[in-house]
Image (cartoon, rainbow, N blue to C red):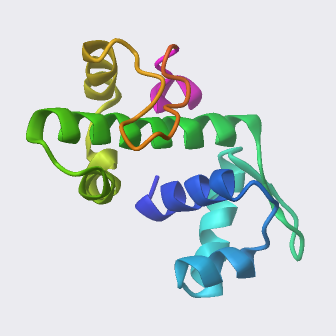
Amino acid sequence: MLDLDYRILKYLFRSSKHLKVGQIAKFLKLPHSTVGSCIKRLEKDNFVIYDRYRSVILTKKGVNLAKELIRHARLLELLLINELDLKAEDAHIESEKFHLLFSCNTINKICERYNHPKQCPCGDSILNSSKCFCEEKLTK
């Protein structure tokens, strides 16, 4: 899966409304064709439902993966703040840059180290923190 696929899944989840490919492309500042190709990949893997000229809808599998991606980023924020004393805003920016590089095992260890937190320091919820879901479990 490409970084763009993950960005689109997170954006669809966070938007809380159904969006068309053009709206997603405009927000991400990418060509419509690039986003359209990505949406087709996501549909093939059952992360979204998409009919041409209609809105893109996350499937349950897509929602779970989006939640897990956001969980990864928020747990890394927590680690960066607690261990490196970064400001919340800086930790957020940094975690968004590299949270995809960490394995689910590492993320789960961060979650365990901080006793399965329900909230990151900036106040956002850490989704599914008590379950420690992982993409590997979602794609099987």
The percent coordinates of residue 113 (x first, y second) are 24, 15
x, y percent for residue 78: 29, 35
Residue at the image point whose x is 31% and y is 13% from the top:
112
Residue 140 visible to the viewer:
no
Query: Is residue 79 depicted above or below 77 in this figure?
Result: above
Decide: is 30 above or below 61. below
Does residue 73 appear left or right of residue 129 in this picture?
Answer: left
Q: Quadrant of residue 37?
A: bottom right
Residue 136 lies within the magenta run: yes
State the image coordinates of residue 59 (x, y, percent, origin top left).
Answer: 76, 42
Q: Nearer the viewer, residue 28 or 15?
A: 15
Query: Magenta part mainly helix, strand or loop?
Result: loop
Residue 10 on image: x %, y %: 57, 53
Magenta-colored stretch includes residue 36? no
- Nearer to the camera, 22 or 39: 22
In the image, which residues are magenta? 131-140
- Total count of labels: 0
Given residues 25 and 1, the one toward you in this image is 25
Q: In the image, is 33 to the left or to the right of 116?
A: right
